[in-house]
Amino acid sequence: METSTLELAQQLIARRSVSPEDAGCLDLVMAQLKPLGFECEIIAMNGVTNLWARRGKALPLVCFAGHTDVVPTGPLENWAIDPFTPTVKNGVLHGRGACDMKTSIAAFVVALRDFINAHPDHPGSLAVMFTSDEEGPAIDGTVRVVEALARRGEKLDYCIVGEPTSVKQLGDMIKNGRRGSLTGILTVNGIQGHVAYPHMARNPIHEVAAAIADMAQIEWDRGNEYFPPTTWQVSNFNSGTGANNVIPGTARVQFNFRFSTASTVESLQTRVHGILDKHDVQYDLEWRQDGRPFLTPKGDLVDAVARAIKEVTGVTTALSTTGGTSDGRFIADICPQVVEFGPTNATIHKVNECLPVVEVEALPKIYLRVLELLLSHR
């Protein structure tokens, strides 16, 4: 008897794969894929395990992408069950990773199996790209697989990332892009001194205050059809010695942009430097780019996912680019069409993470229908 999505999801949840550990999850996946004709390649680096598996050489290439790692459980005493003892109760699957995103991994595998069984001579190729380093630093995960594929000229045509994008019901939202993330670490250089003798010191907090006020109020862009306007937020501000009679010598400000395709990294950096210079701030500024924005306009992949959702669930999906970053930002470098779609996200990263079994059963049907629409023209 073939393994069901629920059974495979439970087997995956039982593996304590707290990032960056895979804990044998990919071995389970490969055991399912190899009999289907997938060539499986493990790309391991610095304690991170990645899987690239492909069936076929022809184009187009459709890829399912995701991660086997999960976030830490938090206090175990707050869980109703052991988070790594998957339990179905009252029609709900409980366990760490039920939503984010071991059910999607299981659904991908089952959809691929069912598609190949029904269409053994399908056109194009199938692939999966799974990592154990998405919830962590994401340094040696999907980005390394993408780099390896790029070096040998291997590109994807379509990619579905199984992130939990649904909000109130399965299929009500898909992500057809994500904002970029750009962090600035600003060190403002002043002169330390006694608060009673301010003429002999230079207060870095005072010097940067007006610039911060400007950046908090500025309209960086107006967004576009798919993206909300770019936002800028201070996330950390540190200064002072702890004494009430000392003017600090430095101030450290960390800020972050979540930016749309209406702006570029370079345009944002140029404007920040311009504002600081306008206010005569003495500073050093280190930039860290966490990801460029990516966007998949309406087209083959978006249309196929939306149609599959409608046919299986009756739900009319909405397109969104909100939320944080995902590994889609890396995959977009070698794939022109990337979409994120997965189960509801109400309990992701929470204590007592859980997912209705009806979603577990419906998800592979949607992924299967997407494959049929993209590869079998039915």
Image (tube, rainbow, N blue to C red):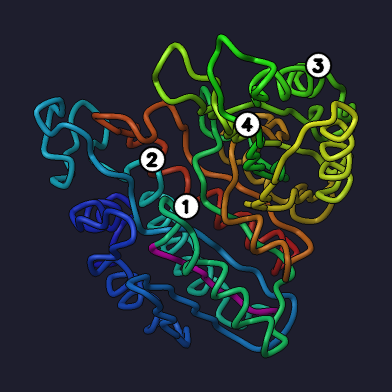
Of mark 1 and mark 3, the one earlier in the sequence is 3
Q: Nearer the viewer, mark 1 or mark 4?
A: 4
Q: Dot 2 lies on which element? A: loop
Identify the residue at image location x=65%, y=46%. 308
Identify the residue at image location x=56%, y=28%. 192
Q: Mark on residue 99? A: 2
Of mark 2 and mark 3, the one earlier in the sequence is 2
Of mark 4 and mark 3, the one earlier in the sequence is 4
Amino acid tagged 3: Gln
Identify the residue at image location x=61%, y=73%. 146
Amino acid tagged 2: Cys
Residue assigned mark 3: 217
Of mark 4 and mark 2, the one earlier in the sequence is 2
Real-space Cα separation, disc 4 to disc 3, in angstroms:
28 Å
Residue assigned mark 4: 191
Instruction: Specify the quadrant that holds the N terminus.
Output: bottom left
